[in-house]
Image (cartoon, helix red, strand yellow):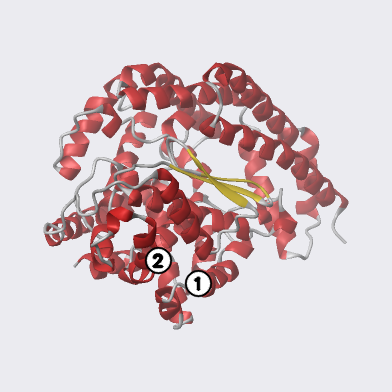
Amino acid sequence: MSHPSYEKLVERCREIALYQSTASLLGWDQETCLPKAGQAYRAEQCAFFGGKMHRLFTAPEVGGWIADCEASPGEAAVEAANVRDWRWSYERATRLSAEFVEETERVRAIAMPAWGEARERSEFSLFRPHLEKIVGIERQRAELLGYVDEPYDALLESYERGATTAAVGELFAQLKPQLVEIGAAAAARSADVPADLLAGDYPIADQQVFNRQVAAAFGFDFEAGRIDTAAHPFCSGLAPGDTRLTTRYDEGDFCSSLYGVLHEAGHGLYEQGLPAAHYGTPAGAAVSLGIHESQSRLWENHVGRGAAFWEHWFPRAERQFEALQGRSAKDLAAFAGRSAPSFIRVEADEASYDLHIILRFEVERALVGGALEVADLPDYWNAKFEEFFGLRVGRDADGCLQDIHWSMGALGYFPTYTLGNLAAAQLFSAACEQRPEIPDELAAGHYAGLLEWLREKVHRHGGQLLPPQLIEAATGQPLSADAHLAHLRRRYL
């Protein structure tokens, strides 16, 4: 029987989960259909829920319950994992006041629609005052949370437990020259694949039908989820039985929305595979954003961009889109695997994608550390982008305004995309080694075997295993860049 204090913690955290799922629903609504006139009051709603949850979790009795559980630990692994994570979260949360949390939520809620307008009009000046507030808040957060080496550590660890700026910086420094080499060779190899190879008219309604078919085939449960439209694609796991994907559409390029859906469906499959019995506790939640991104990048890239994917799906795509008449599965695979420097991260090919992340890491590190001020961001970004990609940014919307993350206050998030790429390659390689039938199943459009392996090795664990433990348990190896670089070389070289 569990310790009485453990039961009280579970009860308290499930109460908080009710507030969290409601706040998440408000966030989804804000990104998809909130009227402009409702933005100011939505900010107050977000502040209320943020403060309410913070006060419930940082109450003195919660600290006492955690101490009781530590003094009389239970035997169950789930209980031990929950207590471990509650202690870590409680120590960090109690360093922040409820008023600080409320103001953070209020600023974010106002900043996100301001970013949307600034991006649409490609005018950084419209977003600058909001970003200045956010950077100020995040610098203050880092000081309140504390760090060993530099402020960015405190923010990075909020998204990837145990990660440090120094370690990520060293990893990225080792990756960068290899990525530049692979990217240059991949671009040269793709030179004969025209950027307008699939140019045509792709009605949004047809895209929605096709995207849904592919997501459902992958295993996304539409009885427990849906797809909507947003300025920036995202996935929200609102509650058990309610996981929502979004994408955006380009009527001249159906692949833009398709790969947005495949990416977000990877997130959605993870959310739908988490143990619902533990919902509201760490054991029922995703363990980190790096692991979350590994799921999205695995389904988008390792499954969705291969030639076998288009051999299977081209006949259905050809029936759905008149513009594909006269094209072939080989054309689709060539287009999906085309490599060329791109301004937009979410549309970047695999060979250049991680360079986008390394650039953002360097920018964020400078912003949080005080070496870069918000007013100087566009020029700094543009210079770095030209250094990384040899392209001159002409519009703010193609530069520092393209991603939603900073308007959400999510400084420290971006490195998890590359950590996710490394984990995705390592997990996919291990899945194919442990179940050699998986490649043939994928070629036939059968995805249940791969999903079952991921359910067993990743999803069912929730937050019980920390990221390094989970990767090593699933693959037999510590996380490394080897599988990812090998994958890129196979695909592009």
- Return the residue found at the far bottom: 436
Q: Quadrant of residue 432?
A: bottom left
Q: Is residue 69 visible?
A: yes
Residue type at mark 1?
Answer: Leu
> Residues at badges 1 and 2 in contact (C-beta under 8 Å)?
yes
Number of numbered discs visible in the structure rendering: 2
- Label 2: how many residues lie within 10 Å, few (<14), some (14-19) or many (20+)? many
Left or right of 102: which side holds 158? left
User: In what element is the residue under mark 2?
Assistant: helix
* Residue that carries the numbered disc 1 in the rendered image: 450
Q: Position of residue 75 (x, y in %)?
A: 78, 65
Q: Position of residue 428 (x, y in %)?
A: 43, 70
Q: Is residue 293 visible?
A: no
Which of the two residues, 466 or 149, is positioned nearer the viewer here?
Answer: 466
Left or right of 451: which side holds 358? left
Q: Position of residue 344 (x, y in %)?
A: 29, 41
Which of the two residues, 17 or 176, is positioned nearer the viewer here?
Answer: 17
- Label 1: how many residues lie within 10 Å, few (<14), some (14-19) or many (20+)? many
**Quadrant placement of the C terminus:** bottom left
Which of the two residues, 309 or 361, is positioned nearer the viewer here?
Answer: 309
Q: Position of residue 338 (x, y in %)?
A: 22, 57
Identify the mark nearer the N-term, 1 or 2: 2
Q: Residue at x 15, y 54 (%)?
A: 194
User: In what element is the residue under mark 1?
Assistant: helix
Residue type at mark 2?
Answer: Val
Gap in angstroms between the C-alphas marked 1 and 2: 10 Å
Q: Looking at the rendered structure, which numbered label has been put on residue 303? A: 2
Left or right of 178: which side holds 312? right
Q: Residue at x 39, y 75 (%)?
A: 443
Q: Residue at x 46, y 42 (%)?
A: 156
**Quadrant placement of the N terminus:** bottom right
Q: Quadrant of residue 144?
A: top right
